[in-house]
Image (cartoon, helix red, strand yellow):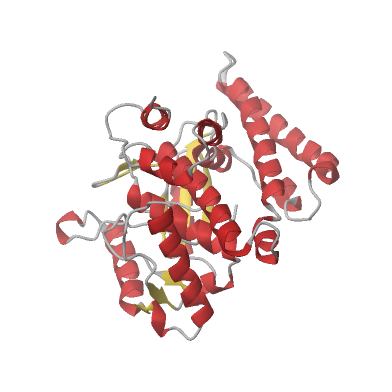
Amino acid sequence: MNNLRILIIFIFSGVLFTGCYTIKQGVTLLGYLNRAVPLEKTDDKDFVNLVNDIRKFAMEDLGLAMSKNYTRYVELDREYLAAVVSASEKDSFRRHEWHFPVVGAMPYKGFFNIEDARKERAKLEKKDLDVWVRKVDAFSTLGWFKDPLYSYMRNYSVGRLADLIIHELVHATVFIKGQVKFNEELAEFIGSEGARLYVESRYGADSEEYRKSFSSDSEYKNYVAFIQELIAELDALYSSEIDRETKLKEKEIIISSAKERFNVEYEKRFSTDNYRGFSSLPVNNAYLELFRIYHAQDNFYSDLYERSGKNLPAFVAGAKTITKKGDPRTQLEKALLRE
């Protein structure tokens, strides 16, 4: 799930330090931020120019909030930023949530030290929850600090870097408290479509840069579609009237059968080996719930984008009108389809 990013919130104001977790993560992040240097001081001028151009496109062309995000740079000795823990009930997709000041309930918890994430996983597993730990490459602090770039990002394709920057700038532009799924789906859609438009506008749809950036998109969509099929099958099981013990047994049968089917159908679905590892993953509800958070199963955003004229700046403008009162999807639809 390399192209999934996450919104991780750490609260740093002294009056909001609420315990060892916040203090430890805050101190680590502040250490990174203190090491950050102006982007222009890096020795890779092509990277500097590319980042600045993506930021300009995101803010001036797409209409995302003006900010100083991604104007600073941190050298890091690893290929990821944080480890994130998610958890879910074993017999349903009901998410475990953590509660933070300012942003409220969140369905994940981030750690800069992966061993801390593993300890959190062990605690949650003792509560009989399905748990998943994953590495993420970026997060947004929602304007509390200037979010920096990290050294491993220099190896990203143009499209992946544009997607990352635009995705995180969406979080800094639109954040509806208590609407995690909406926030992530919106950023995922605008980040992906914004990156495609950026690469197309700078290099052309027939360019080598475009091919490198998006050649794997169709395979990822196929993978998401397969996962959504599995989710739908399990959803039907969880909503049935059978007892919990039977549900758990049936759950394992369904997941095992899905893995076997995945292997049998692999060549029909994929042309590379990128997803062969699925059958060896310890797939559980926490893993599957991530796809429920990031990917709308009803294609709401892509359908609304099509119906409203495929104008991404207008889509962003509509999103910026959403308030915390009422359903954000309904508000977005009204803003874009206003007669």
Residue 110 showing in the rendered view: no
Total number of numbered labels?
A: 0
Q: In this view, does 271 lie above or below 226?
A: below
Task: Tell me: 250 left or right of 102.
Answer: right
* Quarter of the image where one finds residue 28: bottom left
Residue drawn at x 51%, y 36% as measured from the top left: 309
Q: Where is residue 124 drawn, in percent x and y?
A: 45, 44
Q: Where is residue 57 drawn, in percent x and y?
A: 45, 60
Q: In this view, does 46 lie above or below 186?
A: below
Quadrant occupied by the C terminus: top left
Residue 270 showing in the rendered view: yes
Closer to the camera in the image, 191 or 201: 201
Closer to the camera in the image, 335 or 81: 335
* Quarter of the image where one finds residue 251: top right
* Quarter of the image where one finds residue 331: top left
Closer to the camera in the image, 282 or 54: 54
Q: Is residue 174 above or below residue 113?
A: above
Q: Where is residue 188 drawn, in percent x and y?
A: 50, 46
Task: Tell me: 206 left or right of 172.
Answer: right
Q: Where is residue 249 drawn, in percent x and y?
A: 66, 28
